[in-house]
Amino acid sequence: MKNIYKKIACLLALGLTFASCENYLDDVPKGFKSPTTLADYEAFLRDEYTNHRVDITGASQLLNDQYVTIATLSSNRLYNALYLWDENADRIALKVSDETTYYSGYAGISTFNLIIENALNTTKATEAEKRVVWAEAKILRAMNYFNLVNFYADTYVASTASTKLSVPLITSANINAPSKQVTIQEMYDFILNDVKEALPYLLKVSQTPLHPNLGAGYAFYSRVSLQMNNYTEALKYADLALAENNKLYDWIGYYNTNKAIIDVPNSYTTTTSPMGYNYVENYTYRHGTFNSLTTENSIPIERAQRFEAGDARFISRWKIYTVGAETYYRRTLSGAFNFGGITTVEVYLIKAECLARAGQISEALAVLNTVRKTRILPSYYQDIATTDKTTALNAIYRTKRNELINTLIPFADARRLNAEGIYKVSFTKTVNGTAYTLKSDSHLWTMPFPQGAIKNPGNGTITQNVAK
């Protein structure tokens, strides 16, 4: 990992200097600039293609939120193991080059460490301005660590979090910085502390969609609290976030505006994604698996069947498609997608779950139905009404998995619920006459570290958190 981290540090320096990788802030070649002003460091936060990419390919494949072609299943054994839930596959041996999730996560952390270490000592800025950039980097670093710990380590369980290992914790941009693989509890404590320290300095309206604002800080704290099963804190911060931004996008309006294109049979002309930089639901924007303007994943038939009938968001994004022996739902949006940041709809559904957990079923369903009214076409829409807690929670989970498809959250939620053991998540499917099952207690829910990280762990050691 040290060599890769060293390369990351060099790449970060190239935007402002071509100095030596060993100490690129000291020896500056003639004609190049070393970062000294706050603006120099703040510019790193705008590097969206390096520092705002949240690759969750393995999770998407495991959940079958991504269609994988027959040709790819034949050629990529790791993808085959994830997509077809092969518990006998040695994913560690297969994880040779699939390192994007790990190294893009730590590339961002290296940048944010650099800012956190230096922002408060920069020039040409007031103390208040320095604190803002410092706080934004704190939130983004915490978000990256949350993504990594919920990908490569077991989910948070209070009784075991102090004994199970998570991921390497690095708090300095120095390439010789220690790299200690801390416990899950230590990592969550670190994440929460970063957020708490940042909250007093976040702006209500940030400089760009890439810069987390106050609403993003509250929303992220709510997300982390929910993952720790702390429903009281999750609800408290969900309400604070919604007080900053409670807008929901009108997907019914989007469908009606574009239905002349969407409804054409056997036509796959794309329409423009509304889920980009200026999506009204954004607290903060980050790219997902793809860090460029593109299309999203196509999805399997079985996955499409989990959406509600009349879901305008689904109808506007995928259409059934057959090519040769393969039939799936092909993506029909193109542009930018906020799959790595935080949006209001997630916070609404966190709030709904917390209310239901507290026995406030009617209040929880009112929140859920507020979301659904902006998604389900009027000819299909009916309020979900029940007094049963389990029914209510299952309705909330269904909506949340569909709303946040292609993000890390359905994967993180499934792991949390499986560990709890009451609302377990498992899947079955049949492919060419063969039945496949993803069990709720499968080891596949934890991803192995890539071989490159294990063989080159930097100034520390890394222990795999899963056997295969």
Image (tube, rainbow, N blue to C red):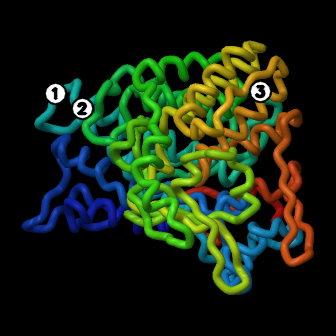
Q: Circle 1 sits in a helix, a strand or a loop, which is it? A: loop
Q: Residue at x 85, y 69 (%)?
A: 86
Amino acid type at mark 1: Thr
Q: Quadrant of the N terminus?
A: bottom right
367 on left or right of 361: left
Indicate the position of residue 378 as horizontal and vertical percent values.
58, 36
Mark 1: give few (<14), some (14-19) or many (20+) Cα within 10 Å: few
> Which of the numbered marks, if any, corresponds to residue 130?
2
Q: Residue at x 80, y 69 (%)?
A: 84
89 on left or right of 246: right
- Residue 463 visible in the picture: no
Indicate the position of residue 251 as horizontal and vertical percent values.
48, 42
Q: Circle 2 sits in a helix, a strand or a loop, which is it? A: helix
For disc 3, the marked residue is: 392
Indicate the position of residue 143 as horizontal and vertical percent values.
51, 42
Do labels 1 and 2 touch, CB within 8 Å? yes
Mark 2: give few (<14), some (14-19) or many (20+) Cα within 10 Å: many
> Which of the numbered marks, if any, corresponds to residue 2?
none
* In-front residue for pair 161/389: 389
Residue 406 in the image: above or below residue 384:
below
* In-front residue for pair 329/104: 329
Label 3 – label 1 distance at C-alpha: 50 Å
For disc 1, the marked residue is: 126
Amino acid type at mark 2: Lys
**Mark 3 vs mark 2: which is more N-terminal?**
2
Residue 397's image quarter?
A: top right
Label 3 – label 2 distance at C-alpha: 45 Å
340 on left or right of 416: left
